[in-house]
Amino acid sequence: MLAEQELGLAAVYRLIKKGGAERVSDEAAEELRIILEEIAVKIAQQAVELATHAGRKTVRAADIRLASKNILR
């Protein structure tokens, strides 16, 4: 688990409501925030590896897209 949360809890509530929920418990929002942050860090780490492998220091949108396809499949 991450020491400090990066995603705002209000944004997570909005995402769940956008998914169709009428009401959202605090526990549900917090759990989704933890899961999303873990996935985001994994994607970012792989994107950094892709950029480094390509000889770049800059992570590009294409690196993120490719990393997300690899992580989320």
Image (cartoon, rainbow, N blue to C red):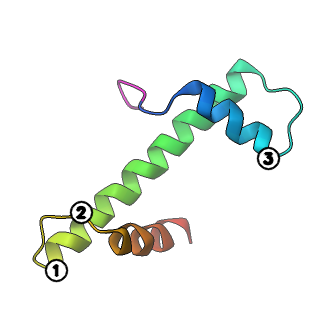
Give the residue drawn at x 25%, y 73%.
50
Residue at the outermost right position: 22
Quarter assignment of residue 35: top right
For badge 1, the amino acid type reads Ala
**In this picture, is 70 found above or below 27?**
below
* Amino acid type, mark 2: Val
Give the overall secondary structure of the magenta segment.
loop
| Quadrant position of residue 25 | top right
Give the magenta-colored segment's residue range.
1-5
In the image, what residue type sits under mark 3?
Gly
Residue 63 in picture, x, y percent from top left: 33, 72
Q: Residue under label 2, please give it.
A: 48
Q: Earlier in the sequence, mark 3 or mark 2?
A: 3
Q: Is residue 28 above or below residue 53?
A: above
- Residue 60 lies, in percent from the top left, at 29, 68
> Which of the 4 image quadrants contains residue 24?
top right
Residue pictured at 38% horizontal, 31% vertical: 2
Which labelled disc corresponds to residue 20? none
Image spot of residue 44 (x, y percent): 34, 56
In primary-sequence order, the first of circles 1 and 3 is 3
- Tell me the CA gap for discs 1 and 3: 37 Å
Q: Regarding mark 2 in the picture, which secondary structure is present there?
A: helix
Q: Is residue 46 above or below residue 55?
A: above
Distance (Cα) linking label 1 and label 2: 10 Å
List the residue tagged with mark 1.
54
Residue 58, percent across and down?
18, 64
